[in-house]
Amino acid sequence: MTDPASPRDERRDDKAPRTARGERTLRALLSAAAEEFGEKGFHDGSVSGITRRAGCALGSFYTYFDSKDDIFRALVNDMSGQVRDYVSPRIADARNGIEAERIGLLSFLEFARAHKEIYRIIDEAEFVDQAAYRAHYENTATRMAARLKKAAQQGDVRADVEEVHAWAIMGMNVFLGLRYGVWDDSRPAQEIADIANALIEKGIGKRA
């Protein structure tokens, strides 16, 4: 799993941190931006609010970001990477392709419950930065499609699984995360993942 102190946004050369201290400052700014935008939204959030939360000087902000738009774009990319880095290692331990999807949803529910702000931030990205918003979902779907293709090759799921199946499963996971991760997290995540996985198994599972 990626070191949480290492920001996942690929900064251009003139904005990239060059020291461990710089890495920590950049991480503090991104974490503060998640809090600021998660609570206030993009339009009401501010650079001064971010630096205050991060305990950084305004000059430190502009060392790494050009504007509020710039850090928001970096934050969307960073949060997308955090989801990937949280889920992927857990899926690697799955016994088969169907189990991988159950673990994937379970892990995502856990992440969403710990980072409820992700939904507001990603949803606002549709209007603030369409490219970052689209990349978040396209990259996720691409990883899922590759996972399903591998499962098909191993005989774990039907041979005709394709991109449509990946988007369908992702859509289910997104709304389950919203309902049982953000709106109400009282129901056991394991139970939610088991119910959803039964649908997947019946839908694309390998028939005897």
Image (cartoon, helix red, strand yellow):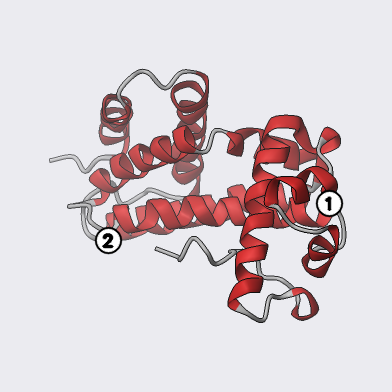
Q: Is residue 184 above or below residue 100?
A: above
Q: Please tell me which residue is depicted at 62% across the width and 70% down the height of the picture.
A: 23
Q: Which quarter shows the N terminus?
A: bottom left
Q: Left or right: 176 with respect to 205?
A: right
Q: Position of residue 102 (x, y in %)?
A: 29, 39
| Mark 1 vs mark 2: in front | 1
Q: Is residue 69 above or below residue 181?
A: below
Disc number at residue 69?
A: 1
Q: Position of residue 144 (x, y in %)?
A: 43, 52
Q: Amino acid at mark 1?
A: Asp
Q: Earlier in the sequence, mark 1 or mark 2?
A: 1
Residue 88 image-quadrant placement = bottom left
Q: Residues within 10 Å of mark 1 (few under 14, many from 20)?
A: some
Front-most of residues 163 and 59 = 59
Question: Outermost residue, left direction?
Answer: 208
Q: Please tell me which residue is depicted at 67% across the width and 35% down the height of the picture.
A: 38
Q: Is residue 30 above or below residue 208?
A: below
Q: Please tell me which residue is depicted at 36% across the width and 42% down the height of the picture.
A: 107
Q: Left or right: 81 with respect to 133?
A: left
Residue that label 2 marks = 153
Q: Please tell me which residue is depicted at 77% across the width and 51% down the height of the picture.
A: 51
Q: Residues within 10 Å of mark 2 (few under 14, many from 20)?
A: few
Disc number at residue 79?
A: none
Q: Position of residue 10 (x, y in %)?
A: 66, 70
Q: Amino acid at mark 2?
A: Gln
Q: Left or right: 122 with respect to 109?
A: right
Per the image, label 1 sits on a secondary structure element best described as: helix
Q: CA distance from mark 1 to mark 2?
A: 43 Å
Q: Position of residue 26 (x, y in %)?
A: 67, 63
Residue 145 seen from this side:
no
Q: Left or right: 74 with respect to 177?
A: right
